Amino acid sequence: MHLKKILYPNILILLLLAALRFTGVDPVIQSENNDTENLTKYHQAQRSIITNYFSEPDIDQMYKTSIKYMVKAIKDSTLEITDSPIDTTFSGVNIESIRDSFRNFERAYLYVANNSADEDMGKLTEAAIRGMFSTLDPHSVYIEAEDNEQIQAEFAGKFQGIGVQFQIIQDTITVITAISGGPSEQLGIRSGDRIIEIEDSSAVGFTNEMVLRRLRGEKGTKVGVTVKRPNVREPINFTITRDDIPLYTVDTSYMLDERTGYIKINRFAATTHDEFMQATRELRNEGMDRLVLDLRGNPGGYLSQAIAIAEEFFPRGTELVSTKSKHKRFDGEYFSRKDGAYIEKPVIVLVDEGAASASEIVSGAIQDHDRGLIVGKRTFGKGLVQQQYELVDKSSVRVTISRYYTPSGRLIQKPFVEGGEEYAYEIYRREDAMDDASEFINHIPDSLKYQTDGGRTVYGGGGIVPDYIVPADTSTSAYVFNFAIREQASFDYVRNFLDENGDAFRAEWESDFENYRENFEWDDTNVEGLRSLLVERGMFISDTVKTPDFRNDTLFVPQGHFEDISWLLEGRMKAELARQVWGMEYFYPIVNDVFDNTLKKAMTLWDAVARLEELASGDSKASAIGNLSGDNNE
């Protein structure tokens, strides 16, 4: 019965449109606009909402907003709107069903198509669909066909191409690193190489999109590139056979000390659990008996992968998450299907305001069952599950199908009544992590307070509040540091350093990263070189300011300030040098060594993890660990 409900209306629409063409009811339809496809697309998008949305959508509002968006996108300023089918005063228009909506949209569409011959009706249809989705939650969206292909590749965990990370610098494609095991790395392409030609045509002045179009392609196809390598007089020609290029979701994994493994996951895609297990096996071989799992900045992804990661920390039969919707087919309870590989290993999870969705499912399950310690800042607050549906032209719509709840019953979704933009930027109003959590907890109603297995209070309605909150560093030293990043000073200085000294540097350091990590230091000449580059790009050293101060594009700093904070810039350059020589995985250990106060704090909390284990085991003598406890403020 459900299949009939989906198929019959689509067939009816196609027959209706075909009838209009053959009977001459509307002979002025512009064939180059592909009206059948556009109208079918609108109908499919609308039906995907009606049949799948987690709550009851307002079909009247959906239709009227879609017309408003379409009218706003019309380029023809002479088109008469008043008392026409696109008149957005909607006098006498009351949409009560999907059939009403489609009939009225078809009338509006044909009015524009027949009276404004140069209008791009495909773009207007897209505008109407965006308007329709703007009436829903911020995570239900329309995705263009070109973006859809890239998103699918990212979440599949691989794409097909030549295998380089690149950046456009001064109109030239610069290789940051050749992806390990990819076709470019196998041919000897390396960081610092400039791609100046693709298939015998100049590649200077390319945008990122143009590079992707020319270098990505089907596995087995070939592309010729010409590379200018620093300190090599003649350009080098390569013929690269494209291949599957993995998109890793585990950014890095390494040992923090002789006992502690560290894994950073950037999103939950199809390969994440496999990558995680591979990383943990390697760390276990190096002696790991406890783990720091870093989910900071991880926006989420596949629910199934979040469940697969979470269940590695629990015994069989442990509830991990549940989903609820107005459609019973999207309701579900998800339990660990096995005894996890790491049910005995102490774990700390790092989170921040950029951790969302699947990241919150993992951290919520670990917190609710008192399985490990959550450290960092309050998470984003996305408790909605989406499903993607493809439309007739290979574009897609992503529709929220259910809410998810942590094992204690928490819905951690934050309010979205303010609208999409305000909703997205809400995290930037959380100036101080401690104040943010205190404010959140102090104003939360009793109905959003829940209990963990061990009796600790946790909170719904706005993300995961960590067990230990670590505020960000807001000292004035961040001014010069952020200025250097914005101006790409560290990146450019390192690139130029390798241009001049790359062979000598690699001969001394490339075979031993740990030696580099522990012992490499920039000399005074390099530090002065960076200082000069920053001055060249807008840093002004002044006797008239006491603290750093931005004025237009110039950063004014007092005498001696650069020298006081140069260690930060040196650390960033060291990390950038590791990235350009060894690859992205080696960037993070240096960054963590120099900058990561949250990780440093987490490494002092293993006694608290042990007390939490006692609490979870039902030991009545265990010390209580509460949010914003005294230990939290150490």
Image: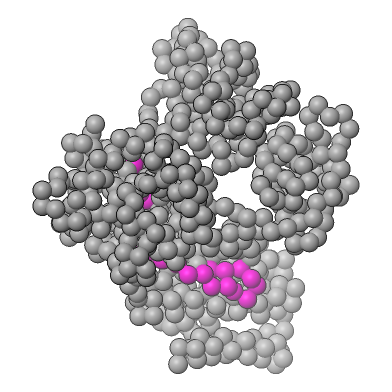
The residue sitting at 21% across, 55% down in the picture is 616
Q: Which of the 4 quarters of the picture holds residue 143? A: bottom right
The answer to whether residue 251 is above or below residue 483 is: below
Query: Residue 409 versus residue 49: which sits nearer the camera?
Result: 409
Q: Locate the N terminus and report the quarter of the image it occupies.
A: bottom left
The answer to whether residue 8 is above or below residue 234 is: below
Magenta span contains residue 386: yes
Residue 221 appears in the rendering: yes
Residue 294 appears in the rendering: no
The answer to whether residue 529 is above or below residue 510 is: above
Q: Position of residue 189 (x, y in %)?
A: 76, 41
Magenta span contains residue 339: no
Q: Which of the 4 quarters of the picture holds residue 435? A: top left
Q: Is residue 277 left or right of residue 341?
A: right
Q: Position of residue 68 (x, y in %)?
A: 51, 65
Q: Is residue 272 left or right of residue 510?
A: left
Query: Residue 472 versus residue 232: which sits nearer the camera?
Result: 232
The residue sitting at 46% across, 28% down in the picture is 594
Q: Position of residue 70 (x, y in %)?
A: 56, 65
Magenta region: which residues?
Answer: 376-397
Q: Locate the C terminus and report the quarter of the image it occupies.
A: top left
Q: Position of residue 507 (x, y in %)?
A: 70, 27
The residue sitting at 28% across, 39% down in the picture is 605
